[in-house]
Amino acid sequence: MSTTPASLATTTALILAAGQGTRMKSAVPKVLHPMCGRPLLHYPVRAALEAGCGEVVVVVGHGRELVAGYLAKAFGDLGGRVKTAVQEQQRGTGDAARAGLSAVAATAERVLIFYGDVPLLEASDVAAVARRLDLDRDAPVAMATCVVPDPFGYGRVLRDAAGNILEIREHKDLKTDAERAVAEMNPGVYAASVAFLRDALEKLTPNNAQGEYYLTDIVSFAVKQGKKVAGVLSRANVMEGVNDRHQLATLEDEMAARIVERLRKSGVTVRTGARIEDGVEIGPESVIETGVVLRGATRIGKAVVVDVGCVLTNVKVGDGVFLKPYSIATDSTIEQKAQIGPFSHLRPESHIGEDAHVGNFVETKKTRMDKGAKANHLAYLGDGIIGAGANVGAGTIFCNYDGFQKHTTTIGAGAFIGSDSQLVAPVTIGDGAYVATGTTVTRDVPPNALAIARVKQENKDDYAIKLKARMKAAKDAAKK
Ligand code: UD1
Ligand code: CA
């Protein structure tokens, strides 16, 4: 379905995104509301770029600094291919297109126009409208049309008896029941030659129910000049716009299903109930269980198992890693074949080495664990370096914070940290050293040394019998 990129090199996409989106009831501009991990506006801009448009001009207005800021961040590396134009007052889609046209490159031959709140559109949908303009040499404008079961609220496509498009009439401007019954609606994707558009937009008037400049009036303008308007019957299921948060959620489900389908077809097992954002990558033979949430720039290798309920945000996961249920990781790296969880918490800048194990109720933060290191149960490991093959016992705490500053705990390769030890940072445990259970380490431990710091045990023979008798007597006395 898609045209070759070269064929749209002299086409500019104009994406209208200046409106406030009142029905979102939000301080955030509508087009910046997130859908599958990216702002709504990301998707139409991407569709235009993928269609091969030489240039994309986004018309901004409401919240313009925020919208322009996002575009610079997301597409700024394309050498100015994505630009913005400002519409000072939101006086209608025709006025927005006029504002956009002023920023279109002098070399552009034609313009593709669509709206910034229609996220499911794909490159092939918009390219088809641009291509029609080329095929229909005597039509200065082409537009997508859709037949829908409930066209309420949309502009309707009115045709003559011979089937020629005459006009788009906005819902509020419909006059008769026959007009209201028209099921062919305007989804809002147009292509036009620059010369025609400049002329048509200059002559718009706001003579309609809403007192706005309607972009849709370019259609009747062409007809009045005796010209033809080409219609492209399009997929209705991708043409829906977002007006409120309910529509946003409905379309987000659609988008999420699309992401899952793409992954499944690339060899990933994704169970129903997993939620995967648009920017996530997953290698083949991996299994993503139900209730898993994968966000941001998470990159998962091959044959990885992400078991039930894990939440990964911006995490790099190597091949063959096993993330057991309900593990949470953020801004971290997990090297190949490591095992995490169940119930592990990797906070930012954790780096878990190859074959390393992090077990239940272990929390790491800014900690590097080298190859084969293990911390299998109940530990807080913040600001640490744990050498290859070291073993950190249950209940170990890195006391990294003195109330003012954070300090580092360094554990050498092959060291053994006995259960219930506190390592008071800054402190270094040498390679091969052994920290006895229950030790509070406050001084560095040399390589291969034993550190032990606990009260010596004393056993009193038969003393338990005497002790119990005394305690029973005390209890009986209290009852009376
Ligand atoms: C528009 C169409 C209607 C079509 C429908 C499809 C017009 C007049 N009507 O109506 O025929 O069926 O879309 O969804 O075009 N915008 C601006 N500046 C403005 C006004 C709007 O940039 O001054 C932007 C909005 O941010 C939005 C888009 O244009 O992204 C569409 O505007 P909206 O008010 O939602 O148009 P509809 O009434 O839905
Ligand atoms: Ca709309």
Image: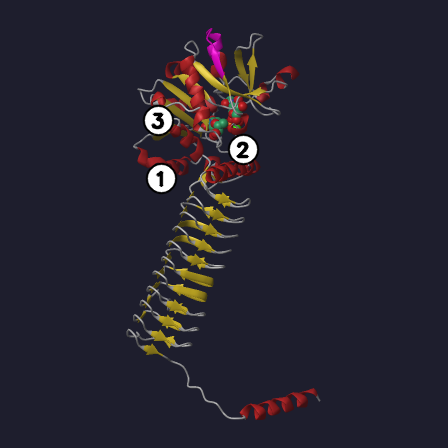
Asked if the stretch drawn in magenta spans residue 230, the answer is yes
- Number of labelled discs? 3
- Seen as rendered, the residue at the extreme right is 480
Amino acid of disc 2: Asn
Q: Position of residue 38 (x, y in %)?
A: 44, 40
Numbered circle sitting on residue 55: 3
Foreground: disc 2 or disc 3: 3
Instruction: Kindly identify the amino acid type of the residue bearing the numbered disc 3.
Output: Glu
CA separation, marks 1 and 2? Answer: 25 Å
Q: Residues under labels 1 and 3: Cα distance?
A: 17 Å
Span of residues in magenta? 221-231
Q: Which residue is mark 1?
A: 73
Of 203 and 181, nearer the camera is 181
Residue under numbered circle 2: 243
- Which of marks 3 and 1 precedes in the sequence? 3
Q: Tell me: residue 389, above or below residue 235.
A: below
- Of labels 2 and 3, earlier in sequence is 3
